[in-house]
Amino acid sequence: MTEFEKKVLRTVLKIPLGEVRTYKWVAEKIGKPKAYRAVGRVLAKNPFILFIPCHRVIRSCGDLGKYYLGKKIKLDLINLEKKIKNMI
């Protein structure tokens, strides 16, 4: 895994439960503001899908973007996390 990939995954780990951020936000956080597409490619091959919440990353326009398990599951996970956050 490259340093870039590690930075992307570590940054995604910091997105709070029940919240979303954009691919661009992740790119800016790692100091590569124009690398938002590369961020998407890293997340598309996330080897730790159960532990690194790549479903919390969406497009800047508000669209969910792609997800390994499908858009419906991505949306379901986001909504479930919001419910859990509100219960805490």
Image (cartoon, rainbow, N blue to C red):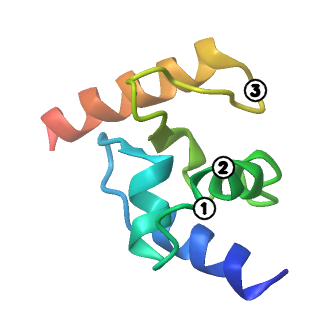
Query: Crowding at label 1, few (<14), some or many (≥20) Cα neighbours within 10 Å?
Result: some
Relative to 41, say whether 48 is above or below: below
Q: Image quadrant of residue 36? A: bottom right
Residue that appears at 33% across and 49% down: 17
Which residue is the site of mark 2? 37
Residue that appears at 36% across and 58% down: 15
The x and y percentages for residue 71 are: 63, 17
Which residue is the site of mark 1? 35
Q: Quadrant of the N terminus?
A: bottom right
Relative to 65, say whether 34 is above or below: below
- The Cα–Cα distance between marks 3 and 2, rounded to whole angstroms, is 19 Å
Give the residue type that dot 1 points to: Ala
| Residue 44 placement, left or right of 15 | right
**Label 3's element?**
loop
Give the residue type that dot 2 points to: Arg
The x and y percentages for residue 86 are: 14, 34
Which residue is the site of mark 3? 69
Mark 2 vs 1: CB contact within 8 A? yes
Query: Upstream in the sequence, badge 3 or badge 2?
Result: 2
The x and y percentages for residue 16 are: 30, 55
- The Cα–Cα distance between marks 2 and 1, rounded to whole angstroms, is 6 Å
Q: Residue furthest front?
A: 34
Q: Which mark is residue 67?
A: none
| Residue 64 placement, left or right of 62 | right
Give the residue type that dot 3 points to: Leu
